Amino acid sequence: MKIMVSVKRVVDYNVKVRVRADGSGVETGNVKMSMNPFDEIAVEEAVRLKEAGVASEIVAVSCGLQACQETLRTALAIGADRAILVETDVELQPLAVAKLLKALCEKESPQLVIMGKQAIDDDANQTGQMLSALLGWPQATFASKIRIEKGSEKAEVTREVDGGLETLAVRLPAVVTTDLRLNEPRYVTLPNIMKAKKKTLETLKPEALGVDVAPRLSTLKVVEPPKRKAGIKVADAAALVDKLRNDAKVI
Ligand code: AMP
């Protein structure tokens, strides 16, 4: 079974993001960039399925600037077999990425696509759902467990839903998106980083896949959240109760 995993290059989750002075977006110059954390979980899950003998090949895919090669090398170091970069300078929106991934699915015919449930930069939570709709494949989103028997034509996916867990069976090929508790990604070791350098990384342009990636919507402005006011100290429990009763507002 071939698995395709999508990986997005985003501002590292430890970085305190700053809004550009002109309000056109978030500052990305001189900022540490990393693989979207949900995508790291997706790559880890694919590697575990390969280690369990369920998957035979893992293809990692990223869409964006040439610098996404770095993100793909990380995916290769975690254990993906080869990588594809769809290179473009255009700022990609979820629908454009979903169309690019659809074209790659038609080219590569994976039986399973594992993606993050959302990218931590745009927080869109759209691309996986759009891809499954475009392909007409089943989807199981927010997976906290994936079970596939060797050679099986279905996957059992446990999802985190409000108030509990839901387990679905999806026919393959399918799209699955990862939630935080699916697994804990391994540390990338130096020997694996070295091995990753020798793995194949193919680069394509969106035109070669016949996809128009022009943005369909424009960002009007981005602003910082309002600064939090400093807290206060109260003298005793009675003063606290008084503040809660009289000053605290229900939002
Ligand atoms: P989003 O819908 O933007 O929240 O992203 C959901 C998931 O789609 C991410 O976790 C990635 O797996 C995938 N994705 C989104 N944008 C890209 C991209 N430019 N390149 C590769 N994968 C992407």
Image: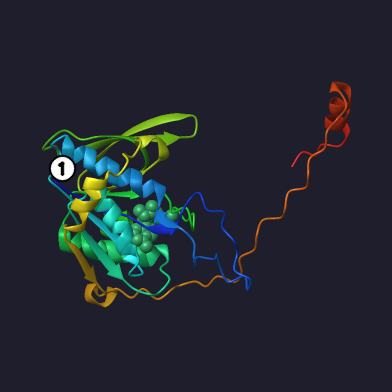
Quarter assignment of residue 42: top left
Residue 67, given in percent of the width and then of the height, sits at 35, 66
Please provide percent x and percent y for residue 72.
Answer: 28, 58
Circle 1: is it few (<14), some (14-19), or many (20+) Cα within 10 Å? many
Pointer 1 residue? 55
Asked if disc 1 is less than 8 Å from ligand 1, the answer is: no
Residue 142 versus residue 198: which sits nearer the camera?
Answer: 198
Q: Position of residue 21 (x, y in %)?
A: 63, 71
Figure quadrant, ligand 1? bottom left
Residue at 12% over, 45% down = 56
Q: Quadrant of residue 240?
A: top right
Q: What residue sits 31% from the left and 65% below the top?
A: 99
Classify mark 1: helix, strand or loop: loop
Question: In the image, 35: left or right of 14?
Answer: left
Determine if residue 49 is in view: yes
Judge left or right: residue 236 versus residue 170. Answer: right
Please tell me which residue is depicted at 15% across the width and 42% down the height of the picture.
55
Most extreme residue toward the top, as rendered? 237
